[in-house]
Structures are given as C-alpha cells and as structure tokens.
C-alpha cells in the first residue's frame, strides 16, 4: 500500500518504489513508480488521498488568502448576466447566468423582422422566453457536470445535447422536443463532442470514440428509433486521424472531416439527403491540411471555399484560400494567395461578404472582402483597432444571409467586448462589454510588448500587463505563463481574476514561445518534433528577460502552465531551476515519453505527429528522453524552487499518474518543496461550475502569492 514517512503527517507522503523495467531501442529504463498507473489499485487511491491531506496541511496558512481572492473574483463578476443574443431561423439564442447558480441557462426568444439583437436586461423577465436547457437542473445532485453537444434543428423543433457526469468526456446524447419540453426516448451513450442535423430534422449525425478515446466513427440516427438501429456513415481506420461532423454556414451540406495533426480529408453530403452517400472533396495527401465551407453564388455555379496549405496549388505553410465547384470539388483555383508574413487562420463566408481571420506580426486581425454576384472577391479592407496589443476573432455568426459580422475583441486591459460590424457601412457597434464590478478603471493598468532573445538568436515576444504605478526596479513579483504546443496561440486577453494579482503589485506576462502559432506556421514547426527543445529555451529566455528588464527578480518570478504547458513547466525546472522562484503545473504532461510510447493510451497515436514516434524511431526516442520531465529530474534536486502540481483522477487527456509519478520522483531526488493536489471528481478542465473554477483559481493564486510575494 502507499507508504507514509515516519510521523505520518509530519512529512510529505512517500510513494513506494517498485522496480519496473522497460527496454526500448537498446535502452533499459527502470520506472519505480509505474504502479501508480493502476487506477483501481487501492494503494494508488490511498497515495493520492495522502497527498491531498498533506497539501491541505501545508497550505492551511493560505486559507484566509484563498477566501479573500475568491471573494474578490466573485464581487467583480456580474453574476446575473446574459450573452448577446445571436439570430438563427427566426429566433434569438442566448445564455443567462443567475447569481448563486453554477451553470448557464440556455434560452431563446422569437425574433421579428428587426435584425438588431434585443436589449435584454440581466435579471429582468423576458416576455416569450423559452428555456431550452437549464444546466443547473441537469447538474443537480452530481459532483461534476459538463455539457458537450448542443445543437438545434433548422425548424427549431428539436434540441440535441450531451451530458457528462464524470469528467471523462464520454457523453450521453439526448434529444429534447422543444415545443413540449419533453425528452424523447432517443438516447445514445458513450458519444463524443459534436453533432449535426439533417435539413428536415429527421436525422441526427453524431460521433463515437474508439478504445484510445479517438473520435473515429460518424453515425446517423433517425429520430424515433433505437440507438441500436443507427447506421455507420463513416469510420476512420487510420489511428492518426480523428473525425468531426458539422454543417456549412449555408446549411446546404453536412461535412465529415478527418484530421491528423498534419493532414486533412473532407467529405460532404447534401443536408436534404441524409441517407445519401458522402462524396470526397479531395483525397488526403500527407502534410496537406484543408478545411471547407460552401458559397452560394448568385448568378453562377455554387462552390466550395477551401483554406489549405498545399504548395502544389498555390498554398504554403501560412495557408491560402481556393475555390472549387461543388461538382468538381478537387479542382482548386486560387482565391487568396499564400503570404510568407501572414497566417490565414480561418474564414467565414456569407451571402455577400467573406471575412478572413488572419495573424500578422503576433496580432490577430479580420479582413473583409465584398463578394460579387459571380462569387468573385472585391477590394478588401481590415477592421481596425487602436490598442497596440489585442486579440480579435469571430464570434457567433449563425446565419448565411446577413449584413453584420459578430466579433469579439479584448486586450490585457480591455474586458471582452462583443461587436457587430456592419459589412456594408463599415462601422462597429458595441453590443456588450464584460462588466467588471467594483470600479475597475483600465487607465490604471498598462500593457507592453517585451522581446527575449533565445540561445539561437530568435526573438521571442512577451505580452506584459501591470499597474501603471508599478516601479520597475526588480522588486515586483511576476507570474509568467506559457504553453507552446499544437500551434495554439496564447493571445493577450482580459481576465477578471487576474486583477487579484495585479492589484497586489504583480506583473503578469505571457511568453509566446515556439510551438505555438503566434508568429505563423513556422513558429509552430520550430517548436515541435525534433525541435521541441526550442519551446523550453524560449521560455527560460523569457524568464531571464523579465528579470533583466527590471520587471521582477528571480526569487519573485513564478511560472504557470497546464497540460502541454505543464510539460513546459517540468522541462524548464529541470533545465534552469535557478531561473524561477516557483512553478505551478496544472494537469501536466510530464511523463511524455512513457505515454507516447504506449499506443494503447488515449490519443497516443494521434500525438505522434506532434511529438514524434519514439516507439518506432530511435532518434525520436533519444530526443524525447532528453527533455521528458519525468526522466530528467536532477539526481540532486535540492536546488529546485517550490512546485505545486494539480491533476484530476478522471482526466482522459493527461492521465493522473503522470503528475503523480513526477511528484514522487521529485521528492525522492530531494526537491525541497513539492505539493500534489488531485481532484477526485473531475477531468482535464478541473472541477465544473463557475464557483468551483473561482475557488480553484483562488487556490492557485494564493499559493503563488504566498510563495513569491511575501
């Protein structure tokens, strides 16, 4: 069983060590904590429970600070609130939150002829409101609740939704008849995210996963029949690929998408022919990614628009846009050329306009193209913003024939703002800015762009925010955040909870390290596979730059990252423990090598295109072994800074045993101050519900403040 040091709670837990050997590519490795992967082993649960008890004891002195921060967050949030209504097929759809309730309430109200969204006051009854789904009612009596699918038929009659009560992201799909409010007998267990309706509301397309948690099968369900009668529409045999299903914005076609990390393939099916056979847009080609939407051409042949990176037809690493007739979908003709300095992220096609989501020089942007009657693109213009650092992206645009474009805008000092952009008149209308209670004044804060220099000379951008009255003499505490994987960009945005740090004199910074997408596809490529170590050296360079520039000092610098960003935390503390005053690692992917070696684990084969395949490639094996945090804890880790690690027992993305093993090895190798907290009823995203999320954030911030700012 889990062994406790003498004196029990006088010292942190010590997991038993059981020799377990693995030989790979001629290399024999002993993993003395492999047994912690046995989730059903009572010793495992006893060990995790003991760790939680130790962490509670070790952080007991932070209890009042945790309560204080939670109260600050709660008091700044307008708890009774609602989203900006979005129009679709004669209804305005929106969500409401109510003070004291954990989850949103999903609603709609009938729309008239006015295209302007109705102004609904928070907490005021809405005449004619129909509650589609009250997540609080669904969650009642459960320790965890998450909503997966949520999609309404075009005629507004049926709602398909999916619920998860464990955190393992296995959902039960259900169908609700909205006029009567009754649940139908149509119920499908063990589904994944995503679903789409046929045009006549008779059929529902949904996804299931294989044993490795890979969404691999698209099913067709006829309303009013048993799930056992459902038909497989498409099954993806290649274990590197996962599938998705959805509608084009025009709602003329269902799209079945197969994706790996580096390759795509799309099939389409007329939405009014749900029992038909899907047609292929273009056969997959290794390292070519593409995505598709449908354009209705007013005086000609309808076509697909295709965002792609195929250099054989005018694409490139930063993607280009092409068009293809529906009748000949593999015949791609260039529409927007590839540009070496601008990444095309996505596009939204409407009846008379095309909006392209772009990234240039770190910043995101939106470019608008008017469309001619023949579908040709007119002279474009950009939607302009004035702040030097910001994030702008599309919001809910549910209708094809519209004259407005819904977008969200935010910066490190500007709360999330929802705008409608008049595509014809070219002006923005602010529909809602996230309320911040308690007298928030953005003029009291200032945002900056710093640049660090990596060991290979690469300039690494850092987004920084602090109070204007902060003195840059190295005395301020700082929280540096990083991620750096999957081409995910950590763009600068406002967070209410961050004020609890800034108003205590903290500097907050985001290191935009390689492996993310902040500087285009090349930025991503230079931080993956056999160049992954660039992610870690970039982050260390960012940490040292924050000290050199006088923002903070090393003992007062805390680093934070989660999931793949947790791998980043584990790697940098091994490589440069002297660069940090504290490390906070959330659901950290720290046993990367062992996990990626095991194709039976969730997502492993899919991940080979991100990290490499150490099972079959000796070079990849050696490279991953050189940085995987669990393998590289220093033999003498006594100079490591304090480390706080959190995980979840039901996480299917980063299994709980990775951080548990890492913590055990850190302790065994002499790391002086390591804490592990395991949520016993949660998944990858932690506990569910907004109040629980605020408590979790308060716990994180209280530990960081207590560690580097006192």
Image (cartoon, rainbow, N blue to C red):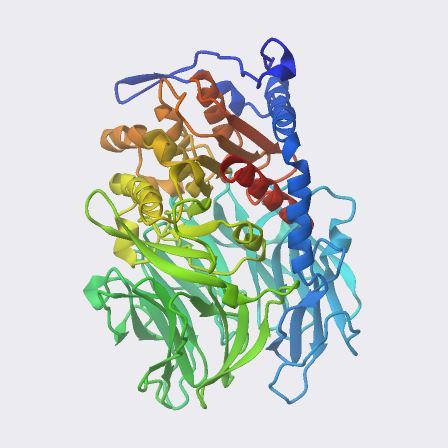
In the image, residue 592 above or below residue 488: above
Task: Please name the residue shown 58% across and 57% down the image.
Answer: 496
Q: Quadrant of residue 74?
A: bottom right
Q: Residue 10 location, x and y as percent?
A: 62, 15
- Front one among 544 and 82: 544
Image quadrant occupied by the N terminus: top right
The location of residue 388, given as percent across then percent down, is: 37, 68
Image vertical order of residue 442 relative to residue 300, above or below: above
Q: Position of residue 258 (x, y in %)?
A: 41, 55
Image location of residue 280, percent across then percent down: 37, 63
- Tell me which corner region of the image, top left, top right, bottom left or bottom right, holds residue 4: top right
405 left or right, relative to 102: left
Residue at 66% over, 70% down:
94
Instruction: Find the residue positioned furthest to the top.
Output: 6
- Residue sitting nearer the eye, 157 or 387: 387
Q: Of 366 and 209, which appears nearest the observer?
A: 366
> In the figure, is residue 201 to the left or right of 132?
left
Does the rendering let one see residue 162?
A: yes
């Amino acid at each position: 069983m889990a062994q406790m040091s003498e004196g029990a709670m006088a010292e942190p837990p010590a997991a038993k060590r059981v020799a377990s050997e693995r030989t790979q590519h001629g290399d024999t490795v002993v993993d003395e904590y492999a047994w912690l992967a046995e989730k059903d082993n009572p010793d495992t649960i006893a060990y995790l429970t003991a760790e939680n008890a130790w962490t509670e004891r070790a952080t007991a002195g932070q209890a009042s600070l945790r309560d204080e921060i939670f109260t600050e967050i709660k008091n700044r949030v307008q708890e009774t609130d609602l989203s900006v209504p979005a129009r679709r097929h004669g209804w305005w759809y929106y969500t409401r939150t109510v003070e004291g309730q954990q989850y949103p309430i999903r609603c709609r109200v009938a729309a008239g002829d006015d295209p302007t969204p109705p102004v609904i006051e928070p907490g005021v009854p809405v005449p004619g409101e129909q509650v589609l789904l009250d997540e609080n009612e669904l969650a009642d009596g459960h320790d965890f609740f998450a909503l997966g699918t949520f999609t309404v038929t075009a005629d507004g009659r049926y709602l398909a939704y999916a619920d998860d009560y464990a955190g393992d992201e296995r959902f039960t799909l259900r169908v609700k008849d909205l006029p009567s409010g009754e649940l139908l007998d149509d119920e499908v267990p063990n589904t994944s995210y995503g679903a789409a309706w046929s045009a006549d509301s008779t059929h529902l397309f949904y996804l299931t996963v294989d044993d490795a948690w890979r969404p691999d099968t698209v099913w067709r369900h006829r309303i009013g029949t048993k799930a056992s009668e459902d038909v497989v529409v498409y099954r993806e045999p290649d274990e590197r690929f996962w599938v998705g299903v959805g509608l084009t914005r025009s709602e003329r076609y269902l799209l079945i998408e197969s994706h790996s990390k580096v390759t795509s393939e799309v099939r389409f099916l007329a939405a009014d022919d749900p029992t038909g056979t899907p047609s292929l847009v273009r056969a997959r080609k290794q390292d070519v990614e593409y995505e598709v939407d449908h354009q209705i051409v007013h005086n000609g042949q309808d076509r697909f628009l295709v965002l792609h990176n195929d250099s054989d037809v005018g694409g490139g690493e930063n993607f280009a846009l092409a068009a293809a007739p529906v009748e000949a979908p593999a015949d791609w003709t260039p529409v927007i050329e590839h540009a070496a300095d601008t990444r095309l992220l996505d596009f939204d096609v409407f009846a008379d306009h095309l909006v392209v989501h772009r990234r240039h020089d770190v910043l995101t942007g939106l470019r608008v193209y008017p469309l001619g009657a023949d579908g040709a693109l007119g002279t474009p213009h950009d939607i302009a913003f004035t702040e030097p650092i910001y994030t702008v992206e599309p919001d809910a645009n549910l209708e094809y024939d519209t004259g407005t474009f819904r977008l969200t805008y935010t910066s490190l000092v500007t709360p999330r703002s929802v705008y409608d952009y008049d595509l014809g008149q070219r002006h923005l209308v602010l529909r809602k800015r996230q309320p911040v209670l308690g007298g928030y004044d953005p003029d009291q804060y200032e945002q900056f762009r710093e640049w660090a220099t990596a060991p290979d000379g690469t300039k690494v951008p850092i987004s920084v925010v602090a109070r204007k009255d902060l003195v840059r003499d190295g005395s301020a505490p700082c929280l540096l955040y990083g991620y750096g994987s999957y081409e995910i960009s950590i763009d600068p945005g406002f967070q209410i909870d961050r004020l609890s740090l800034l108003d205590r004199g903290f500097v907050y910074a985001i290191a935009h390290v390689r492996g993310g997408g902040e500087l285009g596809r090349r930025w991503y490529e230079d931080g993956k596979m056999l160049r992954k170590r660039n992610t870690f050296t970039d982050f260390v360079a960012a940490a040292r730059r924050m000290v050199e520039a006088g923002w903070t000092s090393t003992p007062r610098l805390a680093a934070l990252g989660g999931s793949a960003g947790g791998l980043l935390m584990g790697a940098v503390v091994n490589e440069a423990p002297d660069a940090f005053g504290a490390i906070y690692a959330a659901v950290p992917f720290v046993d990367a090598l062992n996990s990626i070696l095991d194709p039976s684990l969730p997502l492993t084969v899919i991940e080979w295109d991100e990290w490499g395949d150490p099972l079959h490639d000796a070079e990849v094996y050696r490279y991953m072994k050189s940085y995987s945090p669990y393998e590289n804890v220093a033999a003498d880790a006594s100079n490591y800074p304090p480390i706080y690690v959190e995980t979840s027992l039901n996480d299917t993305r980063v299994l709980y045993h990775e951080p548990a093993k890492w913590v055990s090895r850190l302790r065994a190798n002499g790391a002086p101050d390591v804490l592990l907290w395991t949520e016993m009823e949660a998944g990858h995203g932690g506990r569910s519900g907004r109040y629980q999320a605020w408590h979790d954030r308060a716990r994180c911030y209280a530990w960081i403040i207590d560690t580097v700012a006192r």
